[in-house]
């Protein structure tokens, strides 16, 4: 073990150079081509990484360009999976201080799209496996690094890969937060097709279910009782524009939903309209309590409810798109039935994106081992995390997120100037080495 850590340390510069090369491929999703379902750049990046893994003596598998893996063979039948991805979200270079695919190092940080999400941690894991192998370590479980190529835009990668390959026995995904995320709430996104708004009333807001809308526009033939909302008049119709504060839909209370003030004012002006009454009084409550769906458990806390999108059809029908994050001890079916029972029967509920919760118990060997690795190496006494968001680890059973973001570290994932601190890269590689050793030995 000590020997492996020493080798890893000695190969740090090589690891950094490899990461720079990997960042150099702009692996934003591209036009599909034969054997390159996500475009040429993603294909080339996967080829580069698998070729490198082969040069380290690992056995590789290319799953039709959707994903690939590199194995350090074990003596037994079990497999330890490490699930990460090589694709990235787009980067607008004019918003960046340094070129997003340049891999430049400034002030101890390596800049580039994918340095944290998720190329950096995957290259760290690859070098951890390399060092373990060179130190003579022969694991009992096969250590399998799985490189997905479509995590950011549809997850076709894992869908395709796990059609052809079995699930590993146990896995972690270096695509979340340290120390360990072992509980992720269920996701239930759906449209409520309500009834009609009063004649002449229209309301529009938001683009995506999982974002708190920061602006909302409403038209009304009658004057509304609103404070702090801008108003103009156009041919006898009042046009209101409210502003709020955007936030992720899994944490609606961190934002200010711009729809709430206008829906409440409209409901007050039209007390007899069932649609406005329902949306304003029930859907606007971020705890779900007013709707009668306020689930809670000790493992993951309270349900959250985000009203993400409002659309008014030509005929006056209002559709609300809602993103609910429900606690880990409930299911999508339970959520569906609860919503149906608490929503007027004439309103349609149309499921959009739903995903069961992830829950690997805190006392499972996977979680206790990873927590022990983290706390003992970092000198901390942290507990595993529960979140409302979704990480890659949901794609397979018995998987948790382990890094790469450290507690209190500045978050640059999906933002301009994404960067990885070289000190943190060194630390995470060491943590990954220890974790792989302990889980696979
Ligand atoms: Zn990611």
Image (tube, helix red, strand yellow):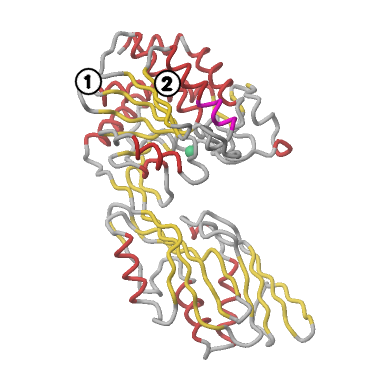
Q: Which residues are magenta?
A: 40-46
**Quadrant of the snapshot with the C terminus:** top left
Q: Badge 2, how many Cα within 10 Å: few under 14, some, many 20+?
A: many
Q: Nearer the viewer, residue 226 or 45?
A: 45
Left or right: where does residue 313 sit relative to residue 143? right
Q: Provide residue 358's location: percent of width, then percent of height.
A: 32, 48
Residue at point 39%, 36% (across, down): 161
Cα–Cα gap, marks 2 and 1: 18 Å
Question: What residue appears at the point 40 percent right and 42 percent down from the top-left corner?
Answer: 159
Residue matched to label 1: 140
Query: Where residue 387 appears, x then y in whole percent?
Result: 39, 49
The residue to which callout 2 is attached is 126
Query: Does the numbered disc 1 mark a residue whose Cβ is under 8 Å from ligand 1?
Result: no
Picture layout, residue 309 above or below residue 38: below
Predominant SS of the magenta segment: helix
Residue 67 drawn in magenta: no
Is disc 1 surrounded by few (<14), some (14 to 19) or many (20+) residues within 10 Å? Answer: some
Question: Is 403 drawn above or below residue 54 in the view shown?
Answer: below
Q: Earlier in the sequence, mark 2 or mark 1?
A: 2
Say which element carries label 1: loop
């Amino acid at each position: 073990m000590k020997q492996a850590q020493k080798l890893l340390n000695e190969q740090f510069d090589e690891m950094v150079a490899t990461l720079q090369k990997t960042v150099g491929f702009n692996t934003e999703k591209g036009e599909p081509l034969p054997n390159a379902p996500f475009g040429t750049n993603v294909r080339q990046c996967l080829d580069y990484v698998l070729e490198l893994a082969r040069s380290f003596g690992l056995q590789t598998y290319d799953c039709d360009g959707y994903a690939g893996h590199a194995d350090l063979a074990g003596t037994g039948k079990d497999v330890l999976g490490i699930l990460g991805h090589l694709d990235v979200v787009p980067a607008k270079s004019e918003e960046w201080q340094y070129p997003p695919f340049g891999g430049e190092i400034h002030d101890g940080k390596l800049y580039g799209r994918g340095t944290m999400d998720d190329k950096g941690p995957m290259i760290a894991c690859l070098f951890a496996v390399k060092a373990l192998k060179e130190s003579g370590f022969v694991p009992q479980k096969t250590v399998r690094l799985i490189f997905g190529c479509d995590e950011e835009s549809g997850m076709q990668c894992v869908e395709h890969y796990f059609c052809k390959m079995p699930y590993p026995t146990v896995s972690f995904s270096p695509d979340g937060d340290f120390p360990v995320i072992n509980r992720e709430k269920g996701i239930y996104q759906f449209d409520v097709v309500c009834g009609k708004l009063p004649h002449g009333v229209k309301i529009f807001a938001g683009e995506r279910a999982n974002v708190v809308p920061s602006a909302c526009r409403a038209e009304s033939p009658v004057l509304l009782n609103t404070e702090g909302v801008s108003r103009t008049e156009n041919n006898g119709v009042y046009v209101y524009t409210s502003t709020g504060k955007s936030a992720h839909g899994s944490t609606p209370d961190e934002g200010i939903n711009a729809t709430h003030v206008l829906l409440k004012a409209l409901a007050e002006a039209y007390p007899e309209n069932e649609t406005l009454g329902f949306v304003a009084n029930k859907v606007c409550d971020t705890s779900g309590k007013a709707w009668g769906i306020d689930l809670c458990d000790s493992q993951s806390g309270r349900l959250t409810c985000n009203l993400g999108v409002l659309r008014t059809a030509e005929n006056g029908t209002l559709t609300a798109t809602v993103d609910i994050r429900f606690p880990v001890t409930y299911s999508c079916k339970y959520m569906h039935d609860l919503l149906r029972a608490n929503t007027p029967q004439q309103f349609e509920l149309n499921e959009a994106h739903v995903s069961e919760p992830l829950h690997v118990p805190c006392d499972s060997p996977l979680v206790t081992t990873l927590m022990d690795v983290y706390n003992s190496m970092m000198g901390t006494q942290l507990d595993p995390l529960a979140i409302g968001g979704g990480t890659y680890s949901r794609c397979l059973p018995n998987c948790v997120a382990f890094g790469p973001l450290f507690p209190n570290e500045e978050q640059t994932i999906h933002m301009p100037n994404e960067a990885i601190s070289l000190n943190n890269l060194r630390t995470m590689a060491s943590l990954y080495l220890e974790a792989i050793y302990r889980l696979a030995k």
